[in-house]
Amino acid sequence: MSEELKTKEPNDTLDVRGESCPVPEMMASKKLKKMKAGQILEVLTDHQPAVDVTLPSLCKSLGYPYVILKDGEVYKVRILKVS
């Protein structure tokens, strides 16, 4: 599954670079609610706590698989909506 998340194009991208917690988590949650099961959301962030704590905890609480990819100074957190 994580291989698919790494290689498949995301269905939507949320750019929260420059935003600090809890904004990335709140905006990702809002965006995921509007998406259909099977779709991938890519969250772009440069806020380390969002990568280390808040976005992973959001995914775990919802039961959504995710991967974190580093692209220079930006992290791409890809989340698969499963239900």
Image (cartoon, helix red, strand yellow):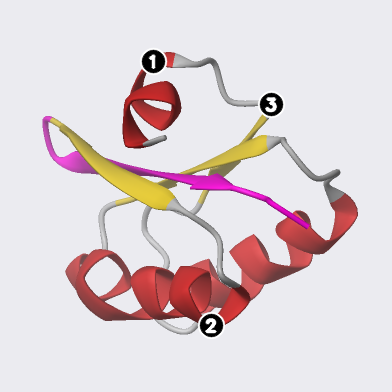
Across and down, in percent, residue 9 comes to 54, 15
The disc at residue 11 is: 3
Mark 1, secondary structure of its residue: helix
Q: What segment carries the magenta color?
A: 72-83
Q: Earlier in the sequence, mark 1 or mark 2?
A: 1
Across and down, in percent, residue 10 comes to 58, 25
Between 54 and 82, the residue placed more toward the observer is: 82
The disc at residue 61 is: 2
Question: Marks 3/1: CA distance?
Answer: 12 Å
Question: Marks 1/2: CA distance?
Answer: 24 Å
Which residue occupies 73% across, 37% down? 38
Given the image, on which type of amino acid does mark 3 rest?
Asn
For residue 75: magenta? yes
Mark 3, secondary structure of its residue: loop
Given the image, on which type of amino acid does mark 1 rest?
Thr
Quadrant housing the C terminus: bottom right
> Disc 3, disc 2: CB below 8 Å?
no
Mark 3 or 1, which is nearer the eye?
1
In the image, is 50 to the left or to the right of 23?
Answer: left
Q: Residue furthest front?
A: 1
Q: Residue furthest left?
A: 72
In this rendering, is residue 13 above or below 30?
A: above
Q: Quadrant of residue 34?
A: bottom right
Which residue occupies 75% across, 56% down? 31
**Residue 14 seen in the figure:** yes
The disc at residue 7 is: 1
Given the image, on which type of amino acid does mark 2 rest?
Ser
Q: Quadrant of residue 20?
A: bottom left
Between 74 and 34, the residue placed more toward the observer is: 34
Quadrant housing the N terminus: top left
Across and down, in percent, residue 74 comes to 23, 40
Mark 2, secondary structure of its residue: helix
